[in-house]
Amino acid sequence: MSSGNSFYVTTPIFYVNDAPHIGHAYTEVAADVLARWHRQAGDTTWMLTGTDEHGEKILRTATANGVSPKEWADKLVEKSWRPLLETIDVANDDFIRTTEPRHEEAVQKFLQKLYDDGFIYAGEYEGYYCVGCEEYKQESELVDGTGPYEGQKVCAIHSKPVELLQERNYFFRMSEFAERLLALYADNPEFVQPESARNEVTQFVKQGLSDLSISRSSFDWGVKVPWDDTHVVYVWFDALLNYITAIGYGNDDESRLDELWPAVHIVGKDILRFHAVIWPAMLMAAGLEVPHRVYGHGWLLVGGEKMSKSKLTGIAPNEITDTFGSDAFRYYFMRAIAFGQDGSFSWEDLSARYQAELANGFGNLASRALAMVTRYFDGTIPEQGEPTDDDLEIQKLVADAAREADAAIEKLAIHDALAHIWTIVDELNGYITDQQPWVLAKDDEQRERLATVLYTVVEGLRALAVLLAPVIPVATDKLWTALGAAESLGALADQPIRDAGRWGQLPAGTVVHQLEALFPRIETANA
């Protein structure tokens, strides 16, 4: 369907039952950085996020709060989930809610097609159900309860008792797709990433797949099964479809679906199986292309434990952004954690990186460079003279870093991309120390050399502004304005990111402006 230069990236749609914590924000920022990078590269780009609003857990919570499930969902979306995107500066193209007609109607069309094609049948089901996970559990996924739940089977994830359900349900013939799925993983190793995730999913499918119960009749908060309105669609079957309903599946006009699909799905590793097993099987049954890639990132750990609302380890994103700002939030989580692995969050690490890398490393570099252009050349970027080996080394480093960062983004290795880009920050700081422009400025005969040194630094900053714009959009925009680049080169968002490493783009004669502190000193960081 989609051509090579389209990039469609999704986050999971988040369950509205909880308030957002930094684990949710981490996924959002990762998807947003990838989308911004591709957008700035000129690719046809679409980023989707949204909320999952059906299912028994939401029905029970709403009832306990004395409101309808829709009222409960509306309140949480407007008070918590949409504001989260502003807090962390996410530039999503769409926000899907599973209660929207465009989604519900398309889910029914998809289901009807599978039913008509013989992939859905009625049957009896008995099994342990965890309302927290909205999922039937195998015996192996249960543990013995302790404390108040002693003598009961509890979910290994939620530590809450499971319920034994017996229902007459509709089933999806998922077992028929085991061989095709195994072939998909073997033939296309990129499909599930990172490798640890692919191995886990492959082992799971090799043990054999059961058919999947895809409807519930014991409650009515969900999408009605089109041929039997006494049943609602199982919440995961409904939720997974958001990735295609949002871009026009089931519409009279499916041109956006044709242009964008298949997608790159960024998901937490705890929901990997839904995305790498159930979802591609559903698509195969419907005759649609499987996703381009399913990337299961690690968990954010606080004090060694996965964050969770129920265990009160959730940290709200604004607890960080109120002190450090959205750029620092975005930079820290993309830089400090190898994308795809678990990572530990600590206030001390965040504070140390803010100070050393952002304020002293990048912010200080920018303010020193612009101050010297102002002091020594009356605020006008000078013409560079004949470059020395030191200057040529910087030029090569910038070109290499830009190329390697783009290659890392292609692999979704955001932390590697940032590490490559940051070599420019470190090298330019070292270059200033070595070249000593303040000494050159005292000698009129060194005027041309001083001009070359300062041009080298500000042109390096121009490349940094472009390359870092997807990660720290607020600071890079301030830097772009201060460099005078907005007047001479146009808007930062319009600079082609894959061309960022080409030397000599910032014209001599450009007038620089006052730079406000990119990363102000923070006296008391949270502890």
Image (cartoon, grey):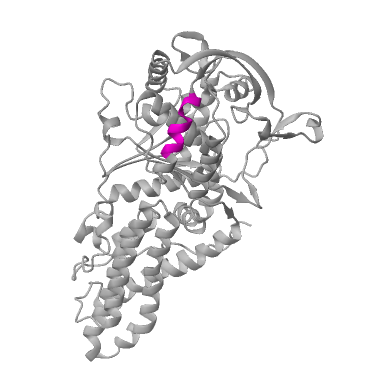
Q: Quadrant of the N terminus?
A: top left
Q: Nearer the viewer, residue 348 or 153?
A: 153
Q: Is residue 110 above or below residue 145?
A: above
Q: Quadrant of residue 57?
A: top right
| Residue 247 falls within the magenta-colored stretch | no
Q: Quadrant of the C terminus?
A: bottom right
Which residue is at a point 77% across and 34% down the rendered structure image? 145
Q: Is residue 411 above or below residue 146?
A: below
Magenta range is 174-184
Which residue is at a point 30% across and 77% down the rendered structure image? 393
The main secondary structure of the magenta stretch is helix
Give residue 292's position: percent from left, percent from top. 37, 40
Give residue 144's position: percent from left, percent from top. 76, 34
Report whether 523 appears left or right of 508: right
**Number of numbered tags placed on the structure image:** 0
Q: Nearer the viewer, residue 352 or 185?
A: 185
Q: Quadrant of residue 168?
A: top right
Q: Is residue 524 above or below residue 216?
A: below
Instruction: Examine the rendering and report whether any part of residue 53 can be seen.
Output: no
Give residue 67's position: percent from left, percent from top. 58, 19
Instruction: Examine the rendering and report whether any part of residue 508 can be seen.
Output: yes
Give residue 383's position: percent from left, percent from top. 19, 76
Q: Nearer the viewer, residue 242 or 425?
A: 242
